Every structure is written in C-alpha cells, then in structure tokens.
Image (tube, rainbow, N blue to C red):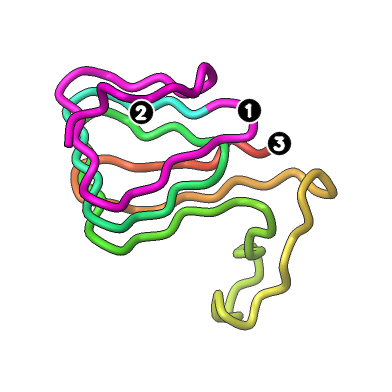
Amino acid sequence: MQAAGLAQKNVTVGDNTTFGKGTVLWAPNKATIGNNIYIGRYCTLMADMEIVDNTVIGNNVGLIGKYDHDYSKIGVSIKDARRLPLGKEKRNCLFALYRGYAKSQHK
C-alpha cells in the first residue's frame, strides 16, 4: 500500500514509500518518513521519529516511544533496563535496520 492516504498533518512521507497491510503510524508531534522506504505488514509506529532514506522495516515491528528503555548501562540487558518516562531525561533511541535507521526524536 502506498502512503497516499495519510491525513495527519505532522507526518511527512517521501517518495516511493510503502506501508504493509495493517500498519499503524501515529506521531504526537512529528514523524518524517524518507524516500524509498518499505514498512512491513502489521507494524506499529507510535512515536516522534525520523526514518531515513532506503530503510526496510520487517513485518510485525513495533517502534513506540512513551517509556523507552535506558540502554546506557553496560552489562544490563535491554529487557532488564529501567524505563525512562517521557520528558524526564534526555535520551536517544536507535534502532538498527537494513540499509538505514530509525531514531526517536525525544528530547
């Protein structure tokens, strides 16, 4: 499905971007989706974010940003890391993806 029907004014989508069936995209403030992006089926993208050009996101991926995990402690697995409440601390979240990246824009 091409990105033609997006109605949210704070979401911009580049050229040649495809969203798989059942994918949900929502941003409280701003989301920028680049060019030549493929987002798989049944993904949930619910955060302020930027997805750069030439990125592929597989099926059933969730990128959410209300309570991100603190990844700054070496030796602590992400599942055991404490959660950072929105706006309490400066943080960046980086998701490594094929041929690109998506990053949270929380400050």
* Of pointers 3 and 1, the one earlier in the residue sequence: 1
Q: Position of residue 18 (x, y in %)?
A: 19, 35
Give how far apart the Cα atoms at labels 2 and 3 are: 19 Å
**In this rendering, would 93 be left or right of 17?**
right
Q: Nearer the viewer, mark 2 or mark 3?
A: 2
Give the residue type at disc 3: Lys
- For the residue pair 34 and 27, the one nearer the viewer reads as 27
Q: Residues within 10 Å of mark 1 (few under 14, many from 20)?
A: few
Give how far apart the Cα atoms at labels 3 and 1 are: 12 Å
Name the residue tied to disc 3. Answer: 107
Q: Is residue 51 above or below residue 7?
A: below
Q: Position of residue 29 (x, y in %)?
A: 63, 28
**In this rendering, would 50 be left or right of 40?**
right
Q: Which residues are magenta?
A: 1-30
**In this rendering, would 48 be left or right of 102?**
right
Q: Residues within 10 Å of mark 3 (few under 14, many from 20)?
A: few
Q: Secondary structure at mark 1?
A: loop
- For the residue pair 56 and 13, the one nearer the viewer reads as 13
Q: Secondary structure at mark 3?
A: loop
